[in-house]
Image (tube, helix red, strand yellow):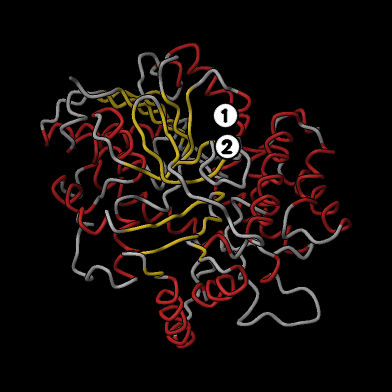
Amino acid sequence: MAGPKVAVIGAGSFFFGQPVIHKMATSDVMAGGVLALVDTDPEVLDTMVGLAGRVFEKTGCGVRVVGSTDRSDVLEGSDFVVLTFSHRNAHYRGVDTGIAAKHGIRMCSSDTIGPGGVFRALREAPRALAMAEDVQKLCPHAWVINFVNPTTVMGMVLQRYAPEVKSFALCDGNHEPYNTLNWCKKAGILPDSADSVPPRVQNRLDLAIGGVNHCTWLVRFRYDGTDMMPELRRQLVDAVEEERKRPGEAAKARFNSAYTLKLFDIYGVLPTNMAHTKEYVPFFQGYGRCSVEPEPVRLFDAGQRAERMAQAWEVTRKYAEGEKEVEEFLSNVADDHATDIIESMWGGLGKCFFINTFNRGAVTNLPDDALLESRCDLDMHGPRPQPVGPFPRGVLALQHQILDTHELTAQAAVSGDRALLRRALLCDPICNNIEDVDACMDELLDAQREALPDYWY
C-alpha cells in the first residue's frame, strides 16, 4: 500500500516542519505517499518544498511533494490534514503577556490559559474552522489533526462546531513510548540506559496520566502493586535543592521542580507539564499578602522566542539550499508525536498515544464530553481513550474550572460575543478581579484589531 497524502497547513512550523519531512523520507509506511505543503508566505513555502525535494531525492522514498500558498489547490485527496499554523506567534504572545502583566496577570507561556490563551484562541480558531470547511469539501474522509495552541480550545472548536469533520488535537508533551519509558527511569524501575519498556515491565505497570492539556497529572503510578509516588517525591526534594543553585533564566523552565513539589503536596498527585501548569494556578501569581516562594512566575519572553525561531529557520534554510548536507538533516532531525501518530494510524501499527479528545468515561468523575488529554488506542477509526479512573478532589475542581474557561473561550471565539469573552476571562483561574479583566480585555481587543475577525468590532 502506498503511503498517505499528508497536507500540512503552516509548512514553516517551528515544531513540525522538519519532522514531517524526516518521517515521510524514512518510514516504510509513508513511502510512495504525497506531502502537500501550504504556507501563506511564498518564501517560506519555497524553502520547505525545496528542502522536502532534496531529502526525498536523497533517500529514494518515492514521496512526492507539492506546495501552494492556497490550500484549496492541494487539499483534494488528503488522508491527513495537520494544522500547524500561527499568526505572528511570538509577537502576539508578547503583546498578550505585556498587557496582561499591566493588569496584574502573569503568564510564562501566554498561549493556553489566562488572557494569552484566550486571545490566541480568538486569533486562531476562526482560521481553523475555515480550514475544516475546506477539508469537508475537498477531502471529507481526511483526519484533521490540530497542532495549534491552545490545544484544548482548538480541539473543542473543531469537534463542537465542525462535527462532520474527523478531528482530534495534539500536544508535543507525553510523547509515547518515551513518556512511559522516562517515568520508569525516574522511578528506578529501568536503568537510565534503557531505550524501551520491555513487555515484562509494561505488564506489571499501572501508570495513569490525564487531564486538560498543559494541566495533566500523574494520578496513579504502581509497579508490582508498589506505589511509586513516594520515590518521585523524594527525587523532587533533591531536584529542588539542585535547582536553587542553577535556576536558569527562561520563564517556562525556571524553578519548575519547586513549583511541581508545591502542587504535588497540595493535590496529592503529580503535575506532568510544569512549564505550563504553573501558569494555570493562582498560587504563583504574586498577589496577596504573602510572598511567593521561590518567586512569582516570570513573564514569557517573546523576544527570546522570536530569536530561537529565527535561528531555527536559518538552519532550515541552509538544509534547503544545500549549505548543510541531507545526511546531517537525517541524522539531527527526529520524528515527532504527530508524525508517529500518522504513521501508526496509516500502517495499522496498533501503537498507543496521548491524544486530546472527548473523555468518554476515561476519567470517571469528569463529563464524557470533557476534552481531555489521555492515553488512547488509535487507528484509522480514531482515538479511543484508555481508562484513567477518578481524579481526586481538589485537582478535580481545578480541571472543572479550566474546562469551563476553555468552553467559554471556544464559544466566544466562534461568536464574537463580548459578554462570553468577558465571562471566559472572569472564569479563568489566574484572572482575579473584575476591573482588571475589563481593562485588560478592552486593551487587548484594541491592540489586536488586525489579527481578529471583524465581528469583534
Q: Which residue lies at the image location 12% right of the left edge and 36% below the top edge?
A: 59
- Say which quarter of the image contains residue 186: bottom left
252 horizontally vs 427: left or right? left
Q: Which residue lies at the image location 79% right of the left edge and 49% below the top edge?
A: 441
- Say which quarter of the image contains residue 301: bottom right
378 horizontally vs 453: left or right? left
Quarter of the image for the C terminus: give it. Answer: top right
Q: Depth check: 286 or 373 in front?
A: 373
Asked if labels 1 and 2 touch by Cβ distance under 8 angstroms, the answer is yes
432 horizontally vs 45: left or right? right
Question: Furthest residue to the front?
Answer: 225
351 horizontally vs 128: left or right? left
Q: Is residue 414 above or below residue 295?
A: above
Give residue 94's position: percent from left, percent from top. 62, 56
Label 2 crowd bin: few (<14), some (14–19), many (20+), radius 10 Å: many
Q: Depth check: 170 or 253 in front?
A: 170
Question: How many numbered marks does the figure carry?
Answer: 2
What is the spatial separation of the Cα atoms under label 2 and label 1, in whole angstroms? 6 Å
Give residue 255's position: percent from left, percent from top. 52, 76
Amino acid type of the residue that numbered disc 1 sits on in the rendered structure: Leu
Q: Which residue is mark 2?
A: 154
Give residue 158's mark. Answer: 1
- Secondary structure of residue under mark 2: helix
- Secondary structure of residue under mark 1: helix
Q: Is residue 244 above or below residue 51?
A: below
Q: Depth check: 342 or 194 in front?
A: 194
Q: Is residue 130 above or below residue 411?
A: above
Q: Is residue 131 above or below residue 320?
A: above
Amino acid type of the residue that numbered disc 2 sits on in the rendered structure: Met
Give residue 240's position: percent from left, percent from top. 48, 82
